[in-house]
Image: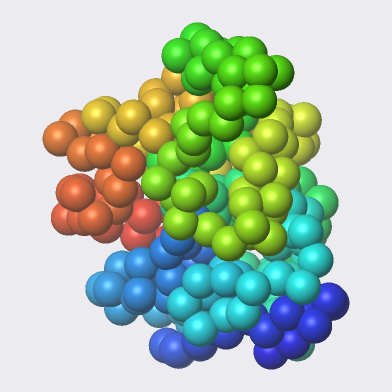
Amino acid sequence: MKVFDGTNVNYIIFGEGKDCVVFLHGWGGSIDSFKFVAENLKLNKKCLILDFPPFGKSTEPKTIWGVREYATALKEIIDREKIDKFDIVSHSFGGRVAIYFSSVYTNKVNKIVLIDSAGIKVKNFKKDAKILLYKIFKSFGIQLNFGSSDYNALSSHMKKCFTKIVNEDLKCYAKTIKSPTLLIYGAKDKDTPICIAKKLNKVIKNSKLVIIENAGHFAYLDNFYQCKPLIENFLGG
């Protein structure tokens, strides 16, 4: 469907039940990132999975999107499908959207699962040093490329969206979340390390943190059969 700025957002709905679970994938992912998980969870609920623009079959945003715009697009889909309240299962960037959405649209969310979620800034001395070095060289007219592979693969328009997103600190939104929240993080996650998990666990009042051993940034895939019962029990499967 087309959302507020004319961007086309692709999504699917399957399963049965009066309740619904919305799955929000990470940056660069798609519906396929969570389809296997949704199909194998025993929840007796409808499942909605979307392709975050510009991934999967969704188009590139017409304007510069940050977390707020992605959450607004989700809200339009929820309203169109006449979904009253729902659970959220999210990963990485999807966690950013889940945090913002759950804070702003409090009455729409039952429970939240944040898997290796981003959203809170932490000190990264290596990254800060790279930024300083980049600025120094730029002042001499020398262009260095320190971008991540995710960043470098983007169009110039999407690089602006990506920059806007990663510079947003959602701590103030996380503090206002009222929904019961389950945090699942891989012990070996280097993209969203355990320090982020602990900060979210501290600021989200009604939250529980579970660390999955032998798992990295994709804990729900690295150790699916340990994550599966955690999600099912938490969401009432």
Residue at (44% x, 40% y) in the render: 148
Q: Position of residue 11 (x, y in %)?
A: 55, 83
Report the residue at 64% width, 73% height from top.
60
For residue 161, say whether it is visible: yes
Q: Is residue 75 above or below residue 200?
A: below
Find residue 80 and report its horizontal and vertical position in percent: 75, 87
Q: Quadrant of residue 194?
A: top left
> Camera-side residue: 143 or 207?
143
Residue 75 visible in the shown view: no
Q: How is the image coloured?
A: rainbow
Q: Nearer the viewer, residue 230 or 168?
A: 168
Please, which residue is most extreme toward the front here? 141
Tell me residue 158's x, y (percent): 63, 59
Please give left or right for residue 191 compared with residue 141 in the image.
Answer: left
Compared across the picture, whether 95 is left or right of 1 comes to left
Residue sitting at 35 percent across and 60 percent down? Answer: 232
Residue 193: % across, % down: 40, 27
> Which image quarter: residue 140?
top right
**Is residue 56 shown left or right of residue 233?**
right
- Quadrant occupied by the C terminus: bottom left
Residue drawn at the location 59% of the way across and 26% of the way down: 142
Q: Quadrant of residue 175?
A: top right
- Could you tell me which quadrant the N terminus lies in? bottom right
